[in-house]
Amino acid sequence: DGMGKNQNPAPPLVTPTTKDEHDVPIAPDEIVASGRMTRAEWDECAAKALALFHRGQTLAAARGLLLVDTKYEFGKDDDGAIILVDELHTPDSSRYWLAESYQARFDDNLEPENIDKEFLRLWYRERCDPYKDADIPDAPDDLICELSRRYILLYELITGERFDFASPSQDRATLIRQSLLDLSRR
């Protein structure tokens, strides 16, 4: 395909998977042939995924980031309408690179500077197969702290706001409702 490591495809690719014990790649034609979705449903999901990704890339670029890849989980509501059923563009499901240094590092064959959990995935991959091994090692405290630092940094870069730690006495449901209300007013 002529692509190099860490080179973003243009246009973006939609690579569906099934949601079994873990993600299993599946081709769009297999999705339709297996009866998991109709062609119209697949086309709708693919179009929604591309629109969401484009919007995420636009917002990330405005903050000096590259949204490199992500996953979206779609389902159907009680009326059969296709809906997004999981989180969106978080570092749990997405990879972000720093835009400012990307091209120079790519040209020098270096890994991009990233703000996601890829480093933690790689740590686990070196020590076990989390999909097959019964005994999964605990990540060391320094890795957990680094993961927290990256998530907070990404939050602050994307939102342009300082991350405020909630008081342990605050009710989480109330905090979530208030945050959603605040976001809807922007």
Image (cartoon, rainbow, N blue to C red):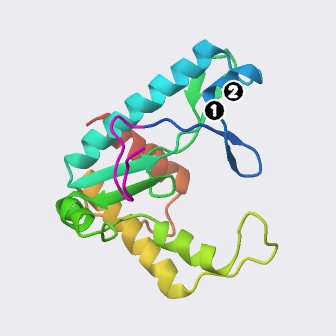
Whether label 1 touches label 2, CB < 8 Å: yes
Query: Which residue is painted at 74% across and 21% down in the image?
Result: 33
Which residue is at a point 71% across and 70% down the rendered structure image?
129
The reply to whether residue 164 is in sight is no
Please identify the quarter of the rendering in which residue 114 is found.
bottom left
Is 11 magenta? The answer is yes
Q: Quadrant of the C terminus?
A: top left
Q: Residue 171: give x, y in percent of width and height.
A: 53, 57
Residue bearing the label numbered 2: 31
Image position, residue 9 (x, y; %):
36, 43
From which residue to which does the magenta span run? 1-12
* Amino acid of disc 1: Ala
**SS at mark 1 in the image:** loop
Q: Position of residue 68 (x, y in %)?
A: 37, 50
Residue at the spot x=65%, y=81% of the render? Answer: 127
**Residue 49 magenta-highlighted:** no
For this view, does 107 lie left or right of residue 77?
Answer: left
* Local secondary structure at mark 2: helix
> What is the crowding at mark 1: few (fewer than 14 residues within 10 Å), some, or many (at least 20)?
few
Foreground tag (1 vs 2): 1
Q: Amino acid at mark 2?
A: Ile
Observer-nearest residue: 117 or 83? 117
Residue, disc 1: 27
Near-viewer residue (182 or 62)? 62
Where residue 167 appears, as percent x and y from the top left, is 45, 68
Give the class, few, some or many, for how many residues have Cα within 10 Å of label 2's Cα (few <14, many ≥20).
Answer: some
Give the left or right position of residue 138, taking residue 99 as reference: right
Residue visible at 17% across and 61% down in the picture = 100
Q: Is 56 above or below relative to 153? A: above
Main SS of residues in magenta: loop
